[in-house]
Image (cartoon, grey):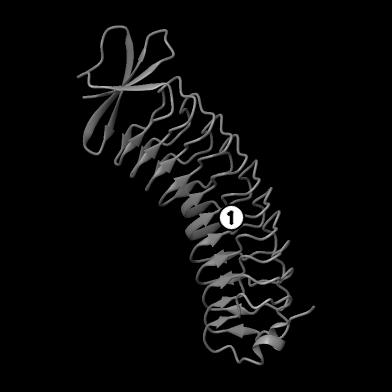
């Protein structure tokens, strides 16, 4: 049964925000051409964005049955949320987003069609991505967790806040940004070392639940908390490195943390000094 915007919402002039969420809509036919505010059509049965208005605020089409973003607005001054649909790529989506961009919980196998710059949070978690090519070059924070990534090639060059690549199939951090101005998490992957990872992390660093057998190429500076749990790592109270161990020093929150590996051994020890 067809349920159009016009049938449910009537004729609106588009002055101010419009919320037509959770009304069983199957079509946006009858929407005003321009909405001077935000537009929320989430939680409906939409299979197309044809008829969607141009807006001056945020646009939320999450929780529908969309397989394409064709027909949606090209420019978003606020946030854009197309999460929890059936999208396999982002072609037809907005080219400019000044706020957050959320495409999580879809069936994405490609980020082609992403805006090149997202000032806010870019969330592509919970998809089927094996590559980050085609994604944004610059973002506020970036979340690509819970995908099928084996490397971070194609990740943004600049991330101004948090970076989360946890719960993937990563065997390498190749492609990660060198500097992360927030938290960095690569937890729950298949990493045996941290080569090609960030050099400096302004927040917390979480590499738990991996297969780390080497601490080479650890970040040189971590300002927040460090979590290496779930690896072959043993915390101890030794004051410093001992003979027969290869150690590196990490500056963390103004203090120095000494992480050591027994020469010729596979067992790691994280030492505090």
Give the left or right position of residue 64, taking residue 188 as reference.
Answer: right
For the N terminus, the quadrant is bottom right
Q: Residue at x 55, y 59 (%)?
A: 102
70 vs 18: above or below: above
Give the left or right position of residue 99, taking residue 247 as reference.
Answer: right
Give the left or right position of residue 232, taking residue 59 as reference.
Answer: left
Q: Nearer the viewer, residue 201 or 39?
A: 39
In percent of width and height, residue 186 lies at: 47, 37
For the C terminus, the quadrant is top left
In percent of width and height, residue 74 lies at: 63, 70
Q: Residue at x 69, y 57 (%)?
A: 87
Please tell me whether mark 1 sits on a helix, a strand or a loop.
loop
Picture quadrant of residue 47: bottom right
Picture quadrant of residue 106: bottom right
Q: Residue at x 43, y 33 (%)?
A: 208
Q: Which residue is mark 1?
A: 104
Picture quadrant of residue 23: bottom right
């Amino acid at each position: 049964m067809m349920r159009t915007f016009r049938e449910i919402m009537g004729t609106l002039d588009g002055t101010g925000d419009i919320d037509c969420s959770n009304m069983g809509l199957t079509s946006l036919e009858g929407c005003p051409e321009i909405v001077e505010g935000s537009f929320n059509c989430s939680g409906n049965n939409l299979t197309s964005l044809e008829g969607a208005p141009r807006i001056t605020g945020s646009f939320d089409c999450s929780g529908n049955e969309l397989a394409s973003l064709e027909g949606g607005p090209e420019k978003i001054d606020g946030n854009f949320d197309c999460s929890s649909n059936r999208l396999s790529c982002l072609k037809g989506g907005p080219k400019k987003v000044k706020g957050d961009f959320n495409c999580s919980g879809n069936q994405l196998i490609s980020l082609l069609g992403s805006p090149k710059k997202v000032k806010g949070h870019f969330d592509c978690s919970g998809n089927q991505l094996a590559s980050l090519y085609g994604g944004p070059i610059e973002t506020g924070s970036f979340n690509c967790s819970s995908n099928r990534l084996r490397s971070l090639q194609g990740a943004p060059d600049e991330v101004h806040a948090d970076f989360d690549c946890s719960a993937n199939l990563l065997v390498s951090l190749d492609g990660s940004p060198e500097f992360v101005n927030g938290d960095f998490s690569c937890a729950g992957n298949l990493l045996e070392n941290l080569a090609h990872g960030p050099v400096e992390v302004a927040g917390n660093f979480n590499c738990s639940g991996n297969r780390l057998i080497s601490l080479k190429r650890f970040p040189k500076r971590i300002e927040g908390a460090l979590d290496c749990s779930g690896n072959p790592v043993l915390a101890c109270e030794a004051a410093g490195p001992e003979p027969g161990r290869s150690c590196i020093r990490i500056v963390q929150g103004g203090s120095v943390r000494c992480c050591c590996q027994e020469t010729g051994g596979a067992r790691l020890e994280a030492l505090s000094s």
